[in-house]
Image (cartoon, rainbow, N blue to C red):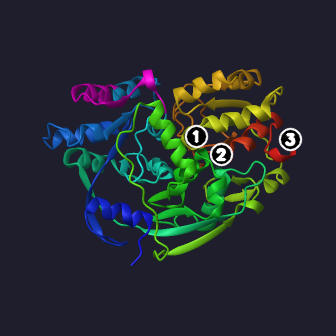
Amino acid sequence: MGQTITEKIFSEHAGKDVFAGEIVRVPIDMTIGNDITTPISIRAFEESGAEKLANPDGFAIVMDHYIPAKDIASANQAKISREFAYKHDLKYFFDEKDMGIEHALLPEKGLVIPGDVIIGADSHTCTHGALGAFSTGMGSTDISFSIITGGNWFKVPESIKVNLVGKPGEHIYGKDIILELIRILGVDGALYKAIEFTGDGVQYLGMADRFSMCNMAIEAGAKSGIFAIDAISQKYIDERKEANGGLRAEPKLHYSDADATYCQEITIDMENLSPVIAYPFLPSNGKPVEQAVADDLKIDQVMIGSCTNGRIEDLRIAAKIMEGKRVAKHTRMIVTPATQKILLQAQHEGLMDILINAGAVVSNPTCGACLGGYMGILGDGERCVATTNRNFVGRMGARTSEIYLANSAVAAASAIAGKIVDPRDI
């Protein structure tokens, strides 16, 4: 009986063949925490009486949500994680000196390995499936169980097969593809399922596209999103290996069998897709950019960044559109590179000069504005175009504010126009 890539990863970790629906306990390769969720895990760890981590080199803490601290409360939260990391001499503790948003930083550091089982106390941990790993979010107490025991329990998820066909047109990116898929599935259409991206169209998707797509799998309720390793992702892995002097572990490549069982199959024609805009107040509320243009939606703020679309490719797209232009008078723009390395690369390429001269404010790598924390809070009734992953009521500030999710080209072009526009018309 054939297996999906997800079933194969669980089988390898369980030491026996397992299939969707089975309950298994498997070892965890990498557990991830951040400055907001880790203190809860630490408290549970200490209350359990545990003294040592089961796998210290398999636990990464990334300080990314409110770092540098925005207030006394966040400073005290960060202090808990720092003291724990120092006490246990964590190898993979990333603070202000080497900062980045966790779901961009860990792949960059060569810590995400194909074939891994990865969990994190953040719902967008599913990002790492872009590198052929099973990666999912869990609660902070689940994380504490994993760092104490080295493993965790799972129900092997069913898989939805998403066939990607055609070559994406101008200014069509992974963000548009995943927003279209979420529109089709709805916010819970993939509940507790793995979304497997496949098809001839995958060859046209770079790593930034794939990270964005897996990142937002959770917005359809999915347990994970995953791509099998191909030449494009293998090149990325090889580059990370060279840049970091090696990988955390040896990759284990898995591929779905031709006779694997899927609970659903969906085909997306990327060639005929328009840029997709997710209207408030759900990521599933996707509409073609033509509709947004017709609605004449004036905007107060544009935000380019986050673990979804804060990579160097996003900054290149934005800078190419904005070179020699200015952000509209009544609009403000925030750019948040996802990691320090991305920020430095953007400076080296001259992208920061272009964006700053256009009127953008550039922040340090942080989750800040995306979750309504700081560095870009929206006021009452304000409207924002964001390359982030959620547009719930009050997500980025005031409950009466509105967030329109879009790709980086739409965001940059809209910043110039002061309203949502089609970048293909610029």
Q: Are marks 1 and 2 in contact (CB under 8 Å)?
A: yes
Chain-order first, disc 1 or disc 3: 1
Residue 403 is marked as 2
How far is disc 3 from disc 2 in space, using C-alphas? 22 Å
Name the element at disc 3: loop
Amino acid residing under circle 2: Ile
Q: Position of residue 206 (x, y in %)?
A: 62, 47
Looking at the image, is 154 positioned above or below residue 333?
below
Residue 65 appears in the figure: no
Q: Residues within 10 Å of mark 1 (few under 14, many from 20)?
A: many
Residues shaded magenta: 79-100
Q: Position of residue 301 (x, y in %)?
A: 70, 35
Residue 379 counted in the magenta span: no
Amino acid residing under circle 1: Met
Amino acid residing under circle 3: Ile
Tell me the residue that label 1 is attached to.
396
As drawn, is 400 to the left or to the right of 113?
right
